[in-house]
Amino acid sequence: MQKLPPTFYTRTDVVQIAKDLLGKYLVTNFEGQLTCGKIVETEAYRAPDDKASHAWNNRRTRRTEVMFSEGGVAYVYLCYGIHHLFNVVTGAKDTAHAVLIRAVEPADNVELMLQRRNMVKPAWQLTAGPGALTKALGIRTEHSGLSLTAVDSPIWMEDRGVKIPGAEILAGPRVGVAYAGECAYWEWRFRVKDSPWTSRPF
DNA sequence: AAGAGGATGAACT
DNA sequence: GTTCATCCTCTTG
């Protein structure tokens, strides 16, 4: 159990980081209630040239400002007024790269995750999809801007020694970004092959 | 000051 | 496959 260091996030290749995050563990610890899931699906967003990114063309607004932080910070935002989407900011300061976590496999304290989702027993719906996993882990927009590397942070990433071989990583186009022109075809969505815990297939 | 729309999920037919 | 829930953020006037 090893918390990922700042150097993991500050690398320049956000697409590589998105792949490296598969098999890592996303942990939250709010008020002594720890929950954790193994990451099985991610998407890379690379401003300024990626039209699908909120920070495309280096747009700075109050919401996107956190994306310009140095890598290792959480970017959480509300989608459709309902869903909290969790991203990890990567790269150097003033470089607005981020990786969206799209699905995790439940790992620790599944009981609490079920409770948060109003479910009785574990199924893939528990944590498949960016809005579902944040609800299960208790992540909300108010956590945007939190460091994932500070010692007292309630959210962090762990390496528990799981290695996903390159052959087990499938790439495909990102979801819900049809408006992004040619960027919509970039295959920057990554998932673990044959995992029953990812969101719907390509 | 007001309105449109969004990196979605669940519950329908 | 289709619909709708639901609210913040950004743009425009």
Image: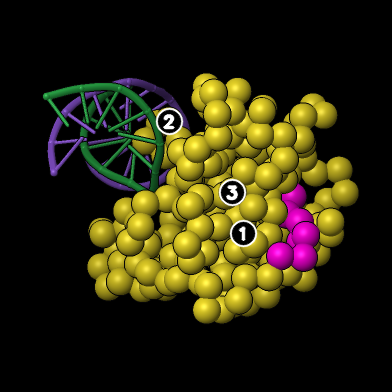
Chain colours: A yellow, B green, C purple
Question: Which quadrant is home to the C terminus of chain A?
Answer: bottom left
Give the mark, 2 or 1, whose residue is nearer the N terminus.
2
Where residue A138 appears, as percent x and y from the top left, is: 63, 32
Q: Callout 3, which amino acid?
A: Glu
Q: Is residue A202 left or right of residue A145?
A: left
Closest to the observer, A46 or C3: C3
Region of the chain picked out in magenta, as a range: A156-162
Q: Residues within 10 Å of mark 1 (few under 14, many from 20)?
A: many
Image point 35% across, 67% down: which residue?
A173
Label number found at residue A89: 1
Amino acid type of the residue tagged 1 in the rendering: Val
Q: What is the distance, in whole Å, between disc 2 and disc 1 at their CAs?
A: 22 Å
Tell me the quarter of the picture where residue A93 sits: bottom right
Marks 1 & 3 on one chain: yes
Point out residue B7 in the picture as x, y percentages from the top left corner: 38, 49
Provide the chain ID for the residue under circle 2. A
Q: Residue at x 26, y 59 (%)?
A: A178
Disc with the residue nearer the chain's start (3 vs 2): 2
Task: Please name whichever residue, A7 or A47, is drawn nearer the observer in this view of the structure.
Answer: A7
| Amino acid at circle 2 | Ile
Q: Position of residue A193 (x, y in %)?
A: 48, 66
- Mark 2 closeness class: few <14, some 14–19, many ≥20 residues within 10 Å: few
Tell whether B4 sits left or right of A34: left
Work out whether A86 lies above or below A41.
Answer: above
Choose between A36 and A83: the one closer to the eye. A36
User: Which structural element holds mark 1?
Assistant: strand
Instruction: Residue at 42% x, 50% y: name it.
Output: A199
A189 within the magenta span: no
Instruction: Give the quarter of the figure containing the N terminus of chain A.
Output: bottom right
Q: Which badge, 1 or 3, comes first in the chain's sequence?
A: 1
SS for callout 2? loop
Q: Can you tell which of label 1 and label 3 is closer to the viewer?
A: 3
